[in-house]
């Protein structure tokens, strides 16, 4: 994906913004949350107007009082912030199921599957921003990057109120000073600075093993988001040689339907999507033919795969008038993620995952299509499947 797809969203001056929202008289004023200036304790947050006076989170209230005597000090109402946070996250979830709540006022979203929904991830970010600000009534800042860390750093650049996209995250990060890297401890920073390293890029070139071995894994922890679980195999297949050659097309279809069923359940269980399907036949003269086609969209749905397989089988059977020795099916272009599909019905997939659950609990043969049942007449049926070939033939 060439556009930055990890979105980080953070509410501006969160606690203070909620107070301003509920009391518009505070708008434009230096609002400081945490307690009264003569109390012990620290500032939770301050409005951007108060920040101009040097007030920031974590500062002693007393110091804040000295720096900003005209500040409006409030104790804060945590319950209210917590409810606002929930509503904020709900708005985000309307745009993508992949929302990771990082703290009370920040979240990450994976926009990689949204290319059918918006012209670009930046457009989507803008739409989310407008929705949040309209519905919740407070300003947010956003960063777009290729990793969580990149996106979070981008939000820092965008604050307050903007959107910043890191198109070239690698270069951007390598130009950063080490102290700008979130999560890099003070001690590590001091040691690295003692070694004469100031910027990420210097560390990457002068001490690549320290970067790759210690720093990068730490700061990129969960960084490529979401962790792409690499598909080990690019295809899965199931095939069977018949105990005797078969000419009855209905019987051939029954075998194929059973094999597709096995593949579908396998895909569901392993959370894979298949992009392409291939059917293979071997005629009694041992000639072997295959035909394949792309599935309408990446799926694990039995019905989608079955419809295509049936079509492919029909084409293959036209090749010769001989009986068949073997039938097989293969799925390819296996992926673990797919784009969000707003225009298609996923009903068939739900059916497949439901069926897969039942099979898991009560055995593979506990639920069958009518077609598959035809096989029960010629093969032994066990809990976990039909014993397709007779033992003597397997040898
Ligand atoms: P932040 O997002 O760090 O700060 P912020 O939203 O106030 O300001 P901005 O993001 O624009 O820089 O934290 C979110 C809320 O968490 C903040 O409003 C108050 C609370 N908080 C504390 O109570 N103590 C702290 O030390 C910090 C950093 C935040
Ligand atoms: Mg914030």
Image (cartoon, rainbow, N blue to C red):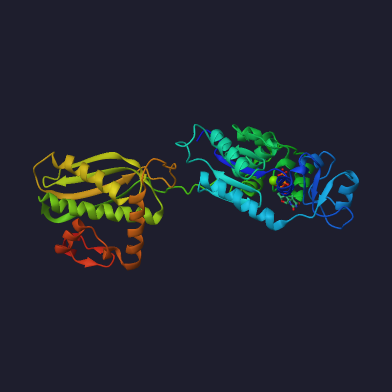
Compared across the picture, whether 56 is left or right of 352 comes to right
Determine which quarter of the picture holds residue 372.
bottom left
- Left or right? Give the position of 290 relative to 107: left
Task: Please indicate, yes or no, whether residue 79 appears anywhere in the rendered image.
Answer: yes
Give 343 or 210, whichever is nearer the viewer.
Answer: 343
Counting from the top left corner in percent of width and height, residue 261 is at 28, 55
Residue at 75% in and 46% down: 189
Residue drawn at (32%, 63%), measured in percent from left and top?
359
Q: Where's residue 54, x and y in %?
A: 84, 42
Q: Position of residue 115 (x, y in %)?
A: 47, 36
- Residue 338, horizontal then vertical, whole percent: 43, 43
Q: In this rendering, does residue 103 appear at all?
A: no
Q: For the point 52% across and 44% down, which residue is it?
A: 95
- Viewer-side residue, 184 vs 213: 184
Residue 201 position (above or below residue 227): above
Q: Is residue 380 above or below residue 17?
A: below
- Asked whether 328 or 249 is in front, the reply is 249
Q: Nearer the viewer, residue 351 or 256?
A: 351
Left or right of 149 in this view: 258? left
């Amino acid at each position: 994906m060439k556009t930055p797809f990890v979105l980080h969203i953070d509410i501006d001056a969160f606690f203070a913004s909620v107070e301003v929202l509920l009391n518009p008289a505070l708008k434009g004023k230096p609002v400081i949350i945490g307690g009264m200036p003569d109390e012990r304790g620290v500032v939770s947050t301050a409005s951007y107007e108060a920040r101009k006076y040097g007030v920031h989170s974590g500062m002693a209230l007393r110091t804040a009082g000295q720096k900003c005597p005209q500040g409006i000090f409030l104790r804060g109402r945590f319950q209210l912030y917590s409810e606002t946070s929930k509503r904020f996250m709900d708005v985000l979830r309307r745009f993508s199921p992949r929302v990771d709540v990082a703290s009370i006022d920040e979240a990450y979203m994976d926009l990689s599957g949204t290319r059918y929904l918006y012209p670009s991830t930046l457009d989507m970010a803008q739409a989310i921003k407008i929705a949040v600000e309209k519905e919740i009534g407070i300003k947010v800042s956003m960063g777009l990057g290729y990793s969580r860390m990149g996106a979070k750093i981008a939000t820092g650049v965008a604050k307050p109120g903007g959107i910043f996209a890191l198109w070239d995250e690698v270069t951007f990060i390598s130009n950063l000073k080490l102290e700008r890297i979130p999560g890099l401890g003070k001690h590590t920073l001091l040691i690295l600075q003692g070694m004469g390293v100031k910027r990420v890029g210097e560390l990457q070139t002068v001490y690549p093993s320290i970067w790759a071995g210690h720093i990068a894994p730490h700061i990129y922890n969960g960084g490529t988001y979401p962790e792409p679980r690499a598909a080990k195999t690019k295809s899965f297949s199931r095939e069977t040689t018949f105990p005797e050659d078969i000419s009855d097309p209905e019987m051939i279809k029954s075998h194929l339907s059973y094999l597709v069923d096995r593949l579908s359940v396998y895909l569901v269980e392993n959370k894979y999507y298949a992009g392409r399907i291939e059917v293979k036949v071997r005629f009694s003269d041992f000639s072997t033919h295959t035909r394949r086609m792309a599935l309408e969209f990446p799926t694990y749905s039995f019905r989608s795969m079955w419809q295509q397989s049936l079509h492919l089988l029909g084409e293959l059977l036209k090749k010769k008038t001989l009986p068949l020795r073997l039938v097989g099916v293969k799925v390819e272009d296996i992926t673990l993620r797919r784009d969000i599909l707003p225009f298609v019905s996923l009903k068939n997939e739900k059916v497949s995952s439901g069926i897969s659950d039942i099979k898991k609990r009560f055995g593979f043969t506990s639920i069958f299509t009518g077609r598959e049942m035809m096989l029960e007449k010629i093969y032994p049926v066990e809990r976990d499947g039909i014993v397709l070939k007779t033992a003597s033939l397997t040898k």
